[in-house]
Image (spheres, coloured by chain):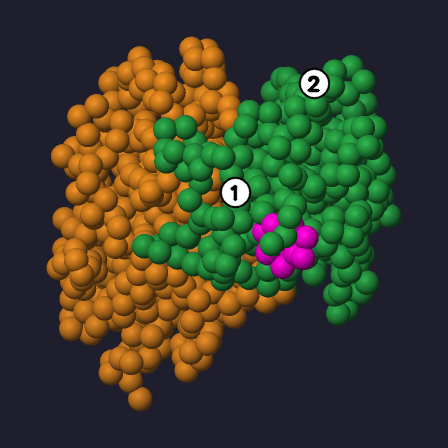
Chain colours: A orange, B green
């Protein structure tokens, strides 16, 4: 019997792919020569602090069907958190507690699946482990629909969100083209600082639809006059103009284009709403045309029924890769995807030092945005296209997708499988 | 060679199923002993008035694959309109023009696929045909995601929208359950006067999720105090409360619960927005809890990738049935679905007089809503469940669903295949 154990947790915002990486970790541990049991910490590192831990090996090992369902289940099977670890030089009490818990469960590797803020946690735990001379391997597994993590070609979760956005824009185009009345439709897409997901809307273009006709990303300052003139010009030749914008578009002074006031969350992000609404009002006031704005809702990050097979397969393999790396003694790192070819599309599974990743964000290169700042260029499409390929065989029962039971997350349901 | 022709058009708001009925009409005409060619009028009756007509038999007949793609394409292949025919006693010029066009193309049957307002057009054309002694058969084919047409068990388009809503609520539940922080999520669903689609959110409930925990329909007056007390009570036992509301909920005096002012469209409907936002603010002001509102966007009516197979199959057969009825000499009617069994679910394809349908709306029976007016009862679930069954084999190419080319609808694309 293998002697040591490991632990996995999930953090940050949901994606359709984050459970695929969890399934990959569970699968990797089953194949592992080293790790016996993989525990799951519920609600990110909070599970460690609140002693809310489940035995994933017991639950999933050997049950291929259940692991498959987990792979296709949206959001976090283990729940999430927005908890930011304090600097351990200021306060190391949480760190002491966490590493005592690792000790108690004989945990020698900790996998944290998350985005930018979660990689900050990976960095801090890595630094602390180094400081105290712990041999617990700390490895991050990326996920974010924002695609803004450094050192990886793209992030798990992004391809599925991109596929959802492109499909939605195509379906919205069908919905919009039906009336013989000029109209403008503004589609607001998630993306605070990086425009990757909004750029993916361009994948919807085909032989009969040029939608989205205009694309505005947060990488370029938004200019009201240029915008109105873009729309007016287009309406001369096009009946139904569809516009994709990032929620985070802002003016040259850095002020968000937003119809509402903003507040801030734990990590200091502005909570945005209303860029689409703001542009809708702008057009209403300045152009005599039917106008509507659509805020694509949370399904853009959790519509697992329309996930990208490429995305989920890669996410799964990154989970397995993380286990392999830990076995090899790698720590203070994040697993990464390196693109080795566009046509045919190929990737290799690598890793990079976490201190080169945490707290940095990757924007869309300006070279991939057109000069007017209202569209993207072909190389960006070449980059995006492979990421949305393939559909996943989600099971349906009684007309609805079948996902993993998550009653262990919400209060008032089945009792927890606690240690 | 068959000697006479027929025509079909589409009107009102989009659904995922309205092209399935169009495919059914084309298929019915191919099988018909009587009708040679089926023409399509672009943008509803406006195509007749503006001489914008295409030959559908030429385009689709014998091409099973293309007919299949049409069946799975959302919104209207023939475009739509919101044109209301004047009373012919006031002004019969449009009627004279339309029936002259029928004469010129040797059209002896006219099929109009649409909702409540479109059935008003069917009634008017039927009455006019009777008045002038025309032998052109006028038959309506129902479609509306609102499910509010009389004399039919349910309407094409509703089952697909219901499947989308229930799946979305389930995916939103997964998205919401991940944080160990109490929250309220309000999901605003289309439905001005009838709550059928909002009621379908209840289909999302399963062994691990009771979402939506509360359901408010326009059939019952909305009471702010009762609402806030419902939410407070639930938050005592449930971490993440999800609430489904119809856009058309209103108070006891009939005032819409809306955060914005309203204007009216051609048919005198109030243009609503913001019931969800309004309830979000209400909770923010009165309960100390994280709250968010989601307005389900137009995908609820056009997400063909998640359509109900039951819905599309029935819609197709209703199209074929309409052709058969016209052949038999039936006119001034709408094809209908009569439920003949719940378990197993069976329907028969019938018809009803248009004057018993037009300008009437079918609400959710009060007997199917609970006494508190914040949930639905089991018989409504029994009614709804069969309608979302089955998935459709939408083709994907390059990661995106493949739909029919609709370049004939939007200005600036491929030239029209006009007569």
Residue under the point 77% across and 68% down: B343
Residue under the point 53% across and 35% down: B53
Can you tell which mark lies on residue B93?
A: 2
Q: Chain of mark 2?
A: B
Report if the CB atoms under discs 1 and 2 are less than 8 Å apart: no
Observer-nearest residue: B207 or A268?
Answer: B207
Q: Residues within 10 Å of mark 2 (few under 14, many from 20)?
A: few
Q: Which residues are magenta?
A: B24-36
Residue B208 seen in render: no
- Does residue B64 appear to the left or right of B140 in the view shown? left
Q: Position of residue A196 (x, y in %)?
A: 28, 41
Can you tell which mark lies on residue B55?
A: 1
In the image, residue A393 above or below residue A301? below
Observer-nearest residue: A157 or A127?
Answer: A157
The dominant secondary structure in magenta is: helix
> In the image as oriented, which residue stretches furthest toward the bottom?
A1
Q: Position of residue A85 (x, y in %)?
A: 32, 47
Residue under the point 42% across and 10% down: A286
Q: Disc 1 and disc 2: Cα gap in Å?
A: 25 Å
| First along the sequence among labels 1 and 2 | 1
> Does the stretch in magenta take in B253?
no
Q: In the rendered view of the protein, which quadrant contains the N terminus of chain A?
A: bottom left
Q: Position of residue B222 (x, y in %)?
A: 76, 32
Circle 2 — which element? Answer: helix
Answer with the quarter of the image where residue A232 lies.
top left
């Amino acid at each position: 019997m293998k002697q040591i154990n490991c632990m996995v947790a999930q953090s940050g915002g949901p994606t359709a792919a984050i459970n695929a990486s969890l399934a990959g970790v569970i699968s990797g541990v089953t194949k592992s020569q080293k790790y016996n049991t993989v525990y799951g910490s519920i609600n990110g590192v909070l599970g460690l602090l609140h002693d809310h831990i489940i035995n994933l090996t017991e639950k999933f090992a050997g049950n291929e069907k259940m692991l498959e369902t987990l792979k296709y289940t949206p959001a976090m099977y283990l729940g999430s958190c927005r908890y930011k670890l304090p600097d351990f030089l200021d306060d190391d009490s949480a760190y002491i507690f966490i590493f005592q818990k690792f000790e108690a469960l004989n945990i020698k590797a900790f996998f944290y699946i998350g985005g930018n803020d979660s990689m900050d946690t990976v960095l801090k735990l890595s630094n602390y482990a180094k400081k105290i001379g712990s041999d617990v391997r700390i490895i991050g597994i990326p996920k974010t629909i924002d695609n803004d993590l450094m050192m990886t070609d793209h992030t798990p979760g992004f391809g599925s969100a991109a596929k959802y956005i492109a499909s939605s824009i195509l379906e919205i185009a069908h919905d919009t083209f039906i009336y013989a009345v000029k109209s403008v439709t503004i589609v607001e897409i998630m993306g605070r600082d990086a425009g990757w997901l909004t750029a993916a809307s361009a994948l919807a273009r085909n032989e009969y639809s040029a939608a989205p006709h205009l694309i505005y990303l947060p990488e370029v300052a938004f200019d009201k006059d240029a915008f109105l003139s873009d729309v007016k010009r287009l309406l001369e030749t096009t009946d139904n103009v569809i516009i994709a914008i990032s929620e985070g578009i802002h003016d040259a002074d850095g002020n968000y284009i937003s119809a509402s006031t903003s507040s801030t969350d734990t990590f200091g992000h502005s909570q945005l709403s209303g860029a689409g609404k703001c542009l809708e009002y702008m057009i209403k006031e300045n152009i005599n045309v039917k106008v509507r704005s659509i805020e694509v809702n949370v399904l853009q990050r959790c519509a697992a029924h329309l996930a990208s097979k490429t995305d989920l397969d890669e996410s799964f393999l990154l989970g397995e890769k993380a286990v392999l790396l830990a076995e090899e003694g790698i720590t203070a790192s994040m697993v990464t995807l390196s693109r080795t070819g566009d046509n045919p599309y190929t990737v290799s599974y690598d890793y990079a030092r976490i201190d080169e990743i945490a707290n940095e964000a990757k924007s869309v290169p300006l070279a991939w945005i057109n000069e007017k700042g209202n569209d993207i260029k072909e190389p960006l499409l070449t980059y995006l296209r492979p990421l949305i390929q393939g559909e996943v065989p989600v099971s349906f029962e009684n007309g609805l997708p079948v996902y993993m039971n998550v009653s262990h997350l919400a209060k008032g349901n089945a009792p927890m499988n606690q240690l």
